[in-house]
Amino acid sequence: MDQKQILLDALAFHGHRCWASTAGVRAGLVALRLLGTQRSGAKSLHAVLENGYHHGAMCFGDGVQYATGCTFGKGNIEKVAKGKLAVTVIDKANKRAVRVAYRPTLQKQIKESAFMQKRSAGIPPTEIPEGEQWELVNLIWEAPEETVLTAGAVVDYAWNEPPEIVRFAICSGCGELVAESYLRVVEGAPLCIDCSGYAV
Ligand SMILES: [Zn+2]
Ligand SMILES: [Zn+2]
């Protein structure tokens, strides 16, 4: 797929246009290129995202998810709490990995942009004029790769896949579907954690 189309689709998925999600798309695409692989709809890749929580640049993670196909739904992406815009993409089949980090050479321009001035004033990104959203998307998208990203070497990475639970049961309390490994048994009846009254 055309890379610009991937960006447009990623921004549509993300919900607004911003520099951090754009950086995430670029980081994901570069990781795939360095690993010599492609976005996967299965689980042949795994991403370790260094975003952390509760800050304004977590949008990076949505760009990575869309570009690589490593998603929270499939469970082949995880967050570690470092507060950084960086990701390690692991090619499980070939046991190789590469880390790609955002390089903040344009941060002064970003900080002074109309978009970020409004974000700092507490205006949600979706309420910022589209032209001002695109200004920062284009700044990151059109910059030379080495200006906005730093890529490490491709390294060997031994991957041990945890077994996947494929059996489910119906909780006899609430009737909801529960993965078997999460069931509790109370007086012989299979119950979900909520219905069992047991602490997690
Ligand atoms: Zn965003
Ligand atoms: Zn239940």
Image: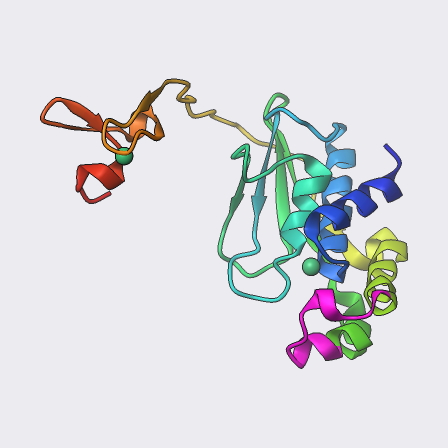
What scheme was used to colour the molecule?
rainbow
Which image quadrant: the N terminus?
A: top right
Q: With 189 as the anchor, is 3 left or right in this view?
A: right
Q: With 163 as the anchor, is 28 left or right in this view?
A: right
Q: Is residue 127 visible?
A: yes
Tell me if residue 124 is in the magenta stretch.
yes
Q: How many marks?
A: 0
| x, y percent for residue 138 | 88, 59
- Quarter of the render that holds ligand 1: bottom right
Q: Residue at x 72, y 64 (%)?
A: 126
Residue 22 lies, with reference to residue 153, above or below; the image says below
| x, y percent for residue 21 | 72, 54
Extreme-left residue of the structure: 187
Q: Is residue 100 visible?
A: no
Q: Residue at x 64, y 62 (%)?
A: 57
- Between 134 and 143, the one nearer to me in the picture: 134
Which quadrant of the figure has residue 125? Answer: bottom right
Q: Residue at x 71, y 50 (%)?
A: 24
Extreme-top residue of the structure: 167
| x, y percent for residue 189 | 16, 24
- Between 50 and 194, the one nearer to me in the picture: 194
Residue 176 lies, with reference to residue 3, above or below; the image says above
Q: Residue at x 22, y 38 (%)?
A: 195
The range drawn in magenta is 117-130
Which image quadrant: the C terminus?
A: top left
Tell me if residue 9 is in the magenta stretch.
no
| x, y percent for residue 16 | 73, 58
